Image: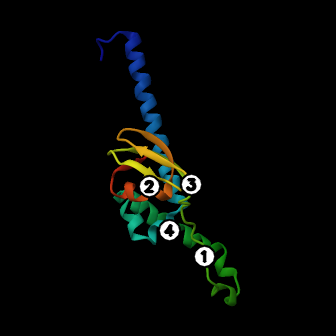
Amino acid sequence: MNDMDPCARLLHELQIDRIRFLLASYLRARLLKIEKYAEYITNNDDMLELLSEREQIFAKQYSELEQSHLQTMFLNGLPDQLKSADQNTTPEPDTNTFVFCKVRENIGRFQLSEDDIVNLNAGDTYVLEYEPIIPFIERGQIDLI
């Protein structure tokens, strides 16, 4: 690297900085999603298995801290008849939203809805509704971006 032209070296360093920024942005976005759905994730073993070991620990700790804070700051001050009310307000991910995805294996023609048929070819990138492609994601044929 020391033998490189100064211009090439600068471009190389800029590329490394860009990659670091993209990785940090990706990890930040992933942690924000884990925070948003921590309770849902920790109560659903299938979802928990999709996380790395460190992400699982983070999700569990975050959920416990959030519940403890809610209990301390709000629920302890409620009358007993309101405490026993159904408190299931766990937010779940919206599966009707659109996601960026990349096809890993040729799938061929796939009917997204009555009117939409798409040809899913390996290496292609799409913006598709999440719900219909869940089975392909679970089988590893499609990756979310």
- Residue that numbered label 1 is attached to: 71
Viewer can see residue 51: no
Sequence-wise, the earlier of marks 3 and 1 is: 1
Secondary structure state at the residue bearing disc 4: helix
**Which residue corresponds to mark 3?**
97
Q: Which comes before the other along the chain, label 2 or label 3?
A: 3
> Measured along the vertical axis of the image, is residue 1 above or below residue 143?
above
Distance, label 3 to label 1, CA atoms, is 32 Å
Residue type, label 2: Ile
Image coords of residue 17 (percent x, y): 44, 29
| Residue at mark 4 to residue at mark 3: CA–CA distance | 18 Å
Is label 1 in a helix, a strand or a loop? Answer: helix
Percent x, y of residue 127 = 51, 44
* Rendering coords of residue 39 (x, y %): 51, 68
Q: Nearer the viewer, residue 134 or 84?
A: 134
Q: Residue at x 38, y 55 (%)?
A: 136
Mark 1 neighbour density, 10 Å: few (under 14) some (14–19) many (20 or more): few
**Label 4 crowd (10 A; few <14 / some 14-19 / many >=20):** many
Q: Are marks 2 and 4 in contact (CB under 8 Å)?
A: no
Q: From the image, state whether disc 2 or disc 4 is nearer to you.
A: 2
Q: Please name whichever residue, 31 or 114, is drawn nearer the observer in this view of the structure.
A: 114
Crowdedness near tag 3: few (<14), some (14–19) or many (≥20) residues, C-alpha within 10 Å? few
Residue furthest to the front in view is 115
